[in-house]
Structure formats: C-alpha cells, structure tokens
Image (tube, coloured by chain):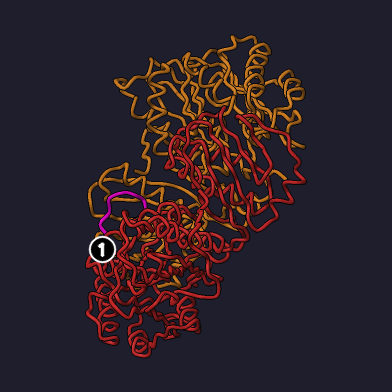
Chain colours: A orange, B red
Amino acid sequence: MPVVIQQAKHVSGTNITSPKGFKAVGIHCGLKHKKYDLAVLLSEVPASVAGVFTTNAIQAAPLIVTKEAVQNGKMQAVIINSGNANACTGKQGMLDALTMQEKTAEKFGLETKLVGVASTGVIGEKLKMEPLLKGIEQLDPVDSLEGSIQFSQAILTTDTVMKNTVYRMEVDGKEVMIAGTAKGSGMIEPNMATMLGFITTDAEIDSVHLQDALQKVTDVTFNSITVDGDTSTNDMVLVLANGMAGNSSLTPSHPDWDVFLQTMHAVAQDLAKMIASDGEGATKLIEVEVNGALTDLEARKIAKTVVGSPLVKTAVFGCDANWGRIIAAVGYSGASVDPAGISIKIGQTVVVEDGEPVIFSEEQLLLYLKQPEVKIFVGLNKGSGQGIAWGCDLTYDYVQINASYRT
Amino acid sequence: MPVVIQQAKHVSGTNITSPKGFKAVGIHCGLKHKKYDLAVLLSEVPASVAGVFTTNAIQAAPLIVTKEAVQNGKMQAVIINSGNANACTGKQGMLDALTMQEKTAEKFGLETKLVGVASTGVIGEKLKMEPLLKGIEQLDPVDSLEGSIQFSQAILTTDTVMKNTVYRMEVDGKEVMIAGTAKGSGMIEPNMATMLGFITTDAEIDSVHLQDALQKVTDVTFNSITVDGDTSTNDMVLVLANGMAGNSSLTPSHPDWDVFLQTMHAVAQDLAKMIASDGEGATKLIEVEVNGALTDLEARKIAKTVVGSPLVKTAVFGCDANWGRIIAAVGYSGASVDPAGISIKIGQTVVVEDGEPVIFSEEQLLLYLKQPEVKIFVGLNKGSGQGIAWGCDLTYDYVQINASYRT
C-alpha cells in the first residue's frame, strides 16, 4: 500500500510551475484583510484537464462553472479566490462565478470555456466583485519559485502551512514532471471536503485517460483523509496536463503508464497527508492501516472510521493508549468484522491480539504517542483487503478556531 | 412531532420505583474510587421485558448475556456496574458477565435467566470480580425515592446529572405509571451508543407488544440523538412491565394503546433530550427540526447530520450564526435535497429562504444563541417528511474530558 516509486523521484525546492509551460501568481486583492486572496494558474497551451468534485448536494457556483468547463476536456487557466466560498449565494453567486471566468479569459486572451474557477472561504456571503475584478486585471503570472509560492499562499484559508510537492519521472526517455499544491484544513472529509488541489504536469495525455488516472488515485489519497467529517460545498482537485514534455501520449498500454500512475499517486498522497496533518488545531498526524479485511474498500472504510472517531482523536491528543476506542470504532464502521480475529498495534506495540487484551508498557507507549506522527495498525484476519487513512488529533485549538471563524 | 399527551401526565419528584412492585438500590463496591458503581433493579414478580441494543459489531459480554435473557420474554432483575464496560475482555469477560448474572440470581432467589446484566465504563480492562461479588451480596433494593436515586447515580460515568422521568396514565380506568432512568454522555450516537436506559412500568402487556412499542419510540428518541458520532459496544435500553397495575393486557387493539405508546414516547424522549444536553462538555442542547423532506426517515437523517456536524456544534458553542455550515451539512447528509428549496431558521430568525441568504440582525441572533437551548429549523419544500434530532455543542471541555479519560 505505501506507494513504491522506483522510476520517479521526489524533487525538492521546486513547485507547481516546475512542469514545462506553467505560470502562476498570487496577490492580495481585498477579500481578506491583508493576506493573499487571489491566484491564477496559466498554461502556455491548452492542457488536457481532469477533475474530481465534492459529493455535497449543495454545490458552490464556481464548482458548477468549472465542472462544465472540464467537460470540454481542455483547460488553460484556473482563477481562484480565498476568503469567500461563493457558495449558497443564489443567482447572483452564479453570475459572479461566470464573470470571474469571463474576465480571466479576457485578461489572458483565452476562450471563456478554457478557464476554471475555484473559491474557498465563508459560505453564504456575496463576493465583493469590485476588488476581485480589479485584482484579475493586475495578475501577472510567472514561471518561477516566487510565483508558485504566491499561488500556494493565496489559496489558503485556516491552513497554517503551504502544501506543495513535485516529482520527476521519465516517459519515452523524456523528462516529465508532476507537481501539486493544495489547501485544506477544516471541513475535511472523504469525498472532497473544502479542499482545493491543483496538479500540473507537462506529460502528454488525453483528458479521458487523465480522468481515469485522477479518479483512481483520489480514492486512496484525497478521499482517504478526514479532519472533522464535514464535507464542503466547494472541493475540487484539478489536473492540467499540457503535453509540453513531448512524450507520446500516455494510455494504459503505454510502457510508462504504471510509473505515471504511481507518480500521480505519490503527488496526491503527499498533498493528502499534508492536509491531514495541517487539520485545524492538529498537533499530530494519525495514520491508520488496516489489513486482513474482506476487501480493500472495507479496509479503507474501517481505517477512515477509526481515524475519524472524535474519541480516538482526543485520546491521541491526550497521548492516551485507549485502544478500546479504536476497537469500538472498528466495530461501528459497518464493515464485516469478527471480534475474535481483531489485532491492534499502536506504533510497534501490540495492544490487542486475536480479540484479547495484551499487557503492554504504558510508559513506552506514552513516549510513542508524544511523537508528531502516530501509526495505528488494525488486523482483521478475515481476508486480504488493505487500506490506509489519514487524519489528525482533536484539540482545544480545533474548538477555538471553529467557535470563532466568522466572528 | 412534539409529543402530545392528552391523557398522560408528567409526575415530578418520583422515580423508577414509582410503578408498583419495583425496587432499586445503588452502592459503592470498589470499581470506582468513591462514587456509586453497582446497582440493581428488582421487580416483585417476573416482568415482560423488551430491549434494544447497540448495532456495533463489537458487543460487550454483558450485552450478549442480556440479549439472550430478553429472548425469554421475562426478566425480574437487572444488575449494572459502572466504571468498567467489560467489553473486549475476551473469554474471561464472558465468564465474568455470566457470574454477575448467576450471583445476582442466587442473591435474590431467582432463576438465572430472569436476570439482565449491564456494564458501562472503560473498554478492554478486566472486571475486578472480588469487590463486585462482595457488592452483589450487600445489595438491598428498596421501594423508595432514596433507592431510586442511588440506582440512577450508580449507573453514571462522565454524566454530570442524573436522568429521570415519570408519567402517569390510565388504562381501563386503572392508574398506570411509566418511569425511566438513563445514563449517557460521551460515545453517544444513534443506534445506541454508550447509553443505558431502564424503563419500568406496572402496565400489563406481553413482551412481543412491549418490544414493538419500544422499537417504535426508540427510532424517534434514543436513536435521534448524537454527541460525537461514536457508537458504543455496551448500549442498551430495557423496559420491564410487571403488570401489577392490573389492567387488561395492552395490545394495539386495546382502546388505551395509543396513550400507552405516547407515554412511552414521552418517557424515552425526555431521557434522550437529557442525555443530549448532558453530552460531554456540553453547554447547550441543540434541537434540529426538519420539515418538507421526502420521507420522515430522510428528515431524521438530515436532522441528525446537522446536529452531528462538528462545525455546526462549534459554531453554536461560539454563538456564531454560521448558517453556511448548516446548509453544507444538509447537503452532505445523503438525503435528497433541492438547493433552491431550502429555508433555514435559527430560533425565530429566518437566515435562508428558498436557497437565498436573508439579511438578519446578527445582534438579535447572538442573544438567542446565548440561550441554553438552540433550535434550528430546516425546510426543504420537497415532501411532507418530518423529523427532529437532538445534540449538543462541541466545547473545550469535550476535548479535555476525552483527552484524559483513562489517564
């Protein structure tokens, strides 16, 4: 399950403009008090595009606009604002999202349908269009570390850190880069919850295969994290592949398809883990690995239920090896489990074996639980299903951040 | 939906021994440091019994023992300990639960199968049988307010208050009482989560009809509350009906069936609301009422999703009228909704009408949100389905209580 990439390499110090032909920038236009709040990503040429979107029945206006644009298979620019989600804003919200798309297209001389729109922030307040449109006029994307950092900063809300990752691989002997940046901190739950993710690559691949690849990796990465179980109205992950690496088009029969898929998986997993560990108020990343479930799907379901349990999350925050809460969450996950077959390890310490409590050193486990990354292993002895999910602890700061978000 | 009982009356100052022929007591036997931790409920004669139990796949030993006893249709005593859940305790745990049952039967000269067993507390630690068995020997249940209060105290864990309610009604012109007591504070989620409920009545009714009645009211009361979404391994609600009121046996064709059902509903709803408002760390009871859903089931699903959303819960704690989080939760509930048909009221203040934000006085709403009980109304304009769910706010104290529960 851990992603093994033999033919791709993580690259440090670079960014979403690393793949050939991408430019980005972020600025402050006036939706937030001081911080960057408007960003654009631009490809030199129209890129194949793929997207995954929130499953929430209430979908924000920009999401509806972008979903339609993605249908065309090509995208050349994405305009993003933070500070306001433009969700539940009625007909005016829809007009505002379309205006953002249109003005960005005009600014960069593109067809309107080649522009995607994303928004994140407070729900239910109308966008301040005046500063936003003035902001679009000022955007000057560049192919540099600086532009990319500004972009990554401008999409953040309550995040405390930027989330970036880049990998390099070879396709047809040519260098191909895949890079990603994301935002997300609260309202994070499977199935896309206020999370925005943007992945760029210079690989040549058509939008149908790109969509297949994205869907495949999303289930085991972005959809396997949870912060609070709330699913947002605005989530989306977009991948733009502009083909500037010059490889022959990637399809499942291409000899380098697997390495491409694995690399995309690695990019998405890096971003997903960064989002989970930057969960609102989080002090620790929690990883739950389940083995021996009936199916991979059931294993992921159990892993996500355990990592999403408020009682498990508070116990990890309190460095309390309260495995009873772990086994209770396994039990109510809805997956098929046999109590006598369950084993649980926290870090390297076995606490339950075949359904029976094991005597362990509380002291040693306390030391382990004080680490910034806590791993929980659950064995079920039912089948060969495997799955991993990521989340974070539940802390005083989560309550503080969310009790006063709007006021 | 609010329970209207025209022919039954809430009675104050009395308790679960109010129905004829019931005795109770609670004592400290040594499972907790100082507080009461062992209780027994005893009926003069074998009573018809009905029960609902946790849906968690991991079920505590006492639950398995009691489930089997309920199958017989009759119960005369229930033995309960707090401080230890006797869950995930393997084969020894099962033996211990059976010993509790057997020793209680011996003590009161009953058949073993007439005794129910319930436990609540920490998961995964073996019961200290020595103090527990000595405790059973000392139990001397009485038909008095004092015995009943001791009982109600002895079943508590992190609860801050006792939960009791009693109603009086007439069946065949004879006085019938229904009384209930419950515990539950954390791990509270639909489908029975560390919640124990005991309802006594002197009505004459067979166990099959009693089970029907209990099931019916459970869905709209105990299964409509949530504190943290965690479902426990130990939940159960038992009803004992000993027939000592002398009415002719209650069945759906009895002229007083409806009033009996409504009264049972009132008892269960009182207890459910008390549990929700005593949720761990809670400062407020939240009630969400949904109207206009496709079905009652969908309405309850939406109500429970909204009242269970950590973001809604923290917003209520912070007195923040952040209705965007309410509408987002409606959207991800999984129920069928039409964004343009949604209306939301917080107290008497309309904040969304037909999917469009409404301008309202933040000041006035802030005053409302400072009250100890917050009501949220969601209208969907899709059908005639109605439902209510109850929960509580998410506070610093929830985190504190649960980060240090075991240590």
What secondary structure predominates along the stretch shown in magenta? loop
Taking the magenta stretch, the answer to whether it contains residue B237 is no
Q: Quadrant of residue A186?
A: top right
User: Percent x, y for residue A314?
Assistant: 52, 60
In the displayed image of the protein, which residue is found farthest to the front?
B173
A295 relative to B375 in the view: left or right: left
**Residue situated in front as seen by the camera: A253 or B108:** B108
**Residue situated in front as seen by the camera: A220 or B362:** B362
**Residue situated in front as seen by the camera: A37 or A314:** A314
Read off the magenta span: A332-340
User: Percent x, y for residue A106?
Assistant: 67, 11
Task: Give the labeled residue for mark 1.
Answer: A354
Secondary structure state at the residue bearing disc 1 = loop
Instruction: Identify which residue is drawn at 34% across, 60% down.
Output: B52
* Observer able to see residue B122: no
Q: Quadrant of residue B56?
A: bottom left
